[in-house]
Amino acid sequence: MVVVRLQRRGTKKAPHHRIVVADRAWSQGGRVLETLGIYDPSYTPPRFSIDEARLAFWTSAGAQVSEAVSRLVRRSKKATA
């Protein structure tokens, strides 16, 4: 199953994340099919960007969106509206 999820990057106590499309069986830091965006909570407010068109493509192709990514997308849409 293909899933859109966060991939942890950065150093200890200074993480940032990539929003990636990967197979659920692959490890968190392993292979990815595509990188859709970034999330960096170290900034105030947290920096978040995602390619909405590619997210729509992957969800229409059957990819499941993780709870964390869906929360971030909802929060960003709420902030811009």
Image: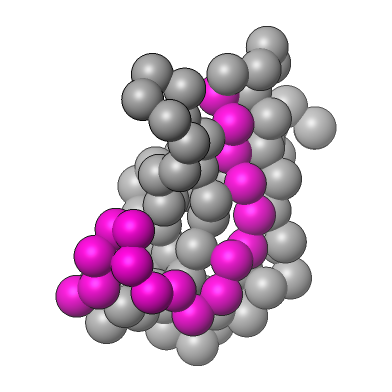
- Residue 63 lies, in percent from the top left, at 41, 77
Q: Residue furthest front?
A: 11
Q: Is residue 26 magenta?
A: yes
Residue shown at the point (55%, 24%) measured from the top left: 41
- Quarter of the image with the N terminus is bottom left
Q: Is residue 28 magenta?
A: yes
Residue shown at the point (58%, 18%) measured from the top left: 42
Q: Residue furthest left?
A: 25
Q: Residue furthest bottom?
A: 61
- Say which of 75 and 54 sits in front: 54
- Quarter of the image with the C terminus is top right
In the rendered image, the vertical position of residue 35 relative to residue 34, given as above or below: above
Q: How many marks?
A: 0
- Residue 62 lies, in percent from the top left, at 42, 83
Its colouring scheme is one colour
- Residue 15 lies, in percent from the top left, at 45, 30
- Residue 60 lies, in percent from the top left, at 54, 82
The magenta region covers: 25-41
Q: Residue furthest top?
A: 44
In the rendered image, the vertical position of residue 16 relative to residue 6, given as above or below: above
Classify residue 17 as left or right of residue 57: left
Quarter where residue 28 is shown: bottom left
Residue shown at the point (63%, 23%) measured from the top left: 46
- Say which of 68 and 46 sits in front: 46
Could one spot residue 66 in this view of the protein? yes
Could one spot residue 74 in this view of the protein? no
In the rendered image, the vertical position of residue 77 relative to residue 57, given as above or below: above
